[in-house]
Image (tube, rainbow, N blue to C red):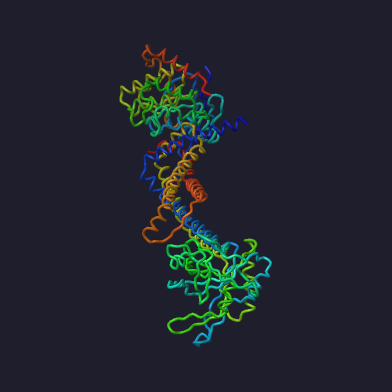
């Protein structure tokens, strides 16, 4: 399997009022295509910083980060924005939908910034994605009119719309009750089964138990990196159909 | 080429998205938006109304000048203000333009037409009917200069003006009556070919004028053409002599004025001022007293232009102040918006928005606000331009001419958009420089 994310000796220092905070102290990591990685660790362990760097929202102080074929560790702001819009999908703890936009418009946003013209094909893709995550009857709703679980599903659809190389999830179930969390995790598992690479930050063992690989961090360094022998699995019945749908709708050209 | 078109279309996509979003949030915060663009609205209203009224004044002046003739120079006899002889009761006052002056004016090569006039009060009689009117001794050219039209008969013609009376070539006692004169002396009948008496001489009526409104004449008085009786200048000289006596409450006031007014037509508009100056020079040399006055109707235009220029200065000050206030209002609200929507900025950046995209979005938002403000101001301004003259006529009995042109409307709209860009620049820049991570954490 080809490596999607390659990180070598990554360091990140913050300067807070003449105090240097070493958030990352030499992290090396390789994630291959189709992996489902859970990043764990206590607060202050550097897992959020690592996720920000992996998400191209932040630049490392030192070290190398190769995403797909691009070395992004020294790119300027505009290029990083371009990388985010093309190769990355974000899922946040607090959903982070744009409140003024409808479901379909929210899903559309990354395409707009990627430089796609909004046309029938893109709209069709957005509607299909909304249907895929089970919101086919809520296309014109605003985020305020949706429940937390529904909002997070819109966010998942949005993270998929640009067919990203990596999906980065920052505590995706942090604001949800256990039943809804379960639904969201089922959905992530199905995405992973369909071949999507997922890196997820969480501090809940229950949630991490879904991932195939668990990385624990402490004090800006990787403490342990183990494969999960028996990850939780999604209900078989819908998985195959889901995967097929996703592939067919993402493979359709939109330009 | 194709690439550039494509990039433009992309730009258009993003811009129109921001535009829709801006309009949505404008509608969402109606009152807030209205208050923040109030300065822009007031500024636009001020620009449009002041320009319209200034322009109206100009048009009014132009209209006046058209009436008096834009290519005319009017020379008037003026009673000298401080004359020792006027204290002596029986002396006749001798002042004003002379026939020699008149002949001199005609020597100027830019003068293409001339109307000499004598005007004095005179009793007009028909049998037992009497009318206190004015006699105007003039020539045929008077008709064209004053744009006179007749009800019946004809005006004076050149042949009426007999220059050197002798055998078989007598002075012609013909006259043309003003509307009021004809009505009083010949009620319910035609005055044509009847005779009237002026100062013991009989005159045949050859024409009657159509009634016309009073006009502000060159010396600034309201002139009622309907009270006048027109006779040939030569006849006037022959029958009256040069002295004219006016009886007033027992005393006899005499004055000797050869010509009361001369209207000169100049060949071209741009030569009118020079001709006026030349005439004034000539009179200065030949008259010891200041018993004359040169009026150039075109000067009225200059006056209106000066008034307009003063108005423009005022306008500039008002517009600058209100647009600055409006702009600051926009800046204030945009800074608040940026803070309020920091989270949104973070989300957009995470989803791939470049700094420029964020900047563009907030610039468009500021522009939409000021444009809407400008549009509201334009509507209010145009309404005011239509309503104000009506109100001022109805309530203050004052004529307030207004003339709406498209330039000030376009200008104020353009300036509104410009203000949006200028004052939106800093907040938009601030928004674009936000750190995505910090912005995402903001709540």
Taking the spot 56% from the left edge, 71% from the top edge, the residue there is B173
Give residue B111's quadrant in the image: bottom right
Give coordinates of residue B4: x percent, y percent: 60, 33
Q: Is the C terminus of chain B in the top left, top right, bottom left or bottom right quadrant?
A: top left
Does residue A124 lie above or below B296 as drawn? Answer: above
Q: Residue furthest front?
A: B168
Give residue B141's quadrant in the image: bottom right
Of B368 and A138, nearer the camera is B368
Q: Is the N terminus of chain B in the top left, top right, bottom left or bottom right quadrant?
A: top right
Does residue B328 lie above or below A181 as drawn? Answer: below
Give coordinates of residue B418: x percent, y percent: 51, 47
Q: Is residue A228 left or right of residue B359?
A: left
Q: Looking at the image, how many numbered discs can be counted on the residues?
A: 0
Taking the spot 39% from the left edge, 45% from the top edge, the residue there is B33
Give coordinates of residue B410: x percent, y percent: 51, 47
Does residue B77 lie above or below B7 as drawn? Answer: below
Q: Is residue A41 left or right of residue B122?
A: left
Give residue B393's quadrant in the image: bottom left
């Amino acid at each position: 399997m080809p490596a999607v994310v390659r990180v070598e000796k990554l360091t990140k220092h913050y300067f807070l009022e003449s105090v240097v905070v070493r958030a990352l102290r030499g992290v090396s990591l390789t994630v291959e295509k189709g992996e489902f990685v859970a990043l764990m660790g206590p607060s202050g362990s550097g897992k959020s910083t690592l996720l920000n760097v992996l998400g191209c929202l932040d630049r490392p102080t030192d070290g190398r980060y190769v995403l797909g074929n691009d070395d992004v560790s020294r790119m300027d702001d505009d290029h990083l924005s371009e990388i985010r819009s093309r190769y990355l999908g974000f899922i946040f703890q607090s959903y982070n939908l744009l409140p003024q936009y409808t479901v379909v418009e929210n899903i559309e946003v990354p395409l707009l910034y990627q430089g796609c013209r909004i046309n029938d094909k893109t709209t069709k893709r957005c509607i299909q994605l909304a249907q895929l995550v089970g919101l086919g009857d809520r296309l014109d709703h605003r985020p305020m009119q949706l429940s937390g679980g529904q909002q997070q599903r819109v966010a998942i659809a949005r993270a998929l719309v640009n067919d990203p190389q990596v999906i980065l999830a920052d505590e995706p179930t942090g604001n949800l009750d256990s039943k809804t969390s379960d639904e969201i995790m089922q959905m992530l598992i199905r995405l992973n089964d369909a071949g999507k690479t997922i890196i997820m930050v969480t501090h809940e063992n229950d949630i991490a138990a879904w991932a195939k690989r668990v990385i624990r961090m402490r004090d800006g360094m990787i403490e342990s990196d183990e494969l999960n022998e028996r990850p939780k699995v999604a209900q078989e019945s819908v998985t195959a159909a889901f995967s097929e749908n996703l592939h067919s709708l993402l493979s359709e050209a939109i330009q | 080429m194709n690439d550039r078109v494509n990039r433009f279309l992309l730009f258009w996509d993003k811009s129109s998205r921001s535009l829709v979003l801006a309009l949505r949030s404008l509608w969402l915060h109606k009152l807030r938006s209205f208050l923040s663009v109030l300065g822009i609205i007031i500024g636009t209203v001020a620009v449009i109304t002041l320009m319209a009224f200034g322009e109206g004044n100009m048009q009014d002046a132009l209209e006046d000048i058209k009436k008096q003739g834009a290519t005319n120079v009017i020379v008037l006899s003026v009673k000298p203000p401080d004359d020792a002889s006027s204290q002596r009761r029986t002396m006749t006052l001798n002042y004003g333009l002379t026939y020699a002056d008149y002949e001199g004016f005609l020597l100027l090569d830019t003068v293409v037409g001339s109307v000499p006039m004598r005007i004095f009060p005179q009793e007009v009689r028909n049998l037992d009917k009497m009318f206190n009117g004015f006699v105007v001794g003039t020539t045929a050219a008077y008709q064209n200069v004053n744009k006179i039209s007749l009800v019946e008969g004809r005006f004076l013609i050149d042949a009426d003006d007999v220059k050197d009376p002798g055998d078989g070539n007598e002075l012609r006692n013909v006259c043309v009556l003003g509307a009021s004169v004809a009505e009083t002396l010949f009620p319910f009948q035609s005055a044509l070919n009847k005779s009237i008496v002026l100062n013991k001489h009989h005159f045949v009526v050859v024409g009657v004028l159509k009634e016309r409104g009073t006009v502000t004449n060159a010396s600034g008085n309201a002139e009622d053409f309907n009270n006048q009786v027109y006779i040939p200048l030569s006849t006037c000289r022959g029958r009256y002599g040069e002295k004219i006596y006016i009886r007033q409450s027992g005393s006899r006031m005499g004055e000797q004025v050869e010509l009361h007014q001369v209207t000169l037509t100049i060949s071209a508009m741009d030569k009118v001022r020079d001709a006026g100056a030349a005439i004034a020079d000539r009179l200065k040399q030949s008259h010891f007293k200041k018993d004359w006055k040169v009026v150039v109707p075109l000067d009225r235009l200059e006056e209106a232009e000066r008034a307009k220029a003063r108005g423009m200065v005022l306008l500039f000050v008002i517009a600058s102040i209100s647009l600055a206030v409006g702009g600051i209002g926009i800046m204030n609200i945009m800074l608040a918006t940026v803070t309020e929507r920091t989270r949104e900025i973070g989300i957009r950046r995470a989803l791939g928005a470049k700094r420029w995209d964020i900047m563009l979005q907030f610039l468009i938002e500021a522009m939409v606000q000021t444009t809407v403000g400008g549009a509201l101001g334009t509507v209010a301004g145009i309404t005011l331009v239509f309503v104000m003259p009506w109100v001022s006529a109805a309530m203050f009995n004052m004529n307030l001419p207004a003339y709406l042109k498209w330039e000030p409307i376009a200008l104020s709209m353009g300036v509104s958009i410009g203000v949006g860009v200028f004052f939106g620049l800093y907040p938009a820049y601030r928004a674009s420089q936000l750190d995505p991570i910090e912005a995402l954490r903001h709540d």
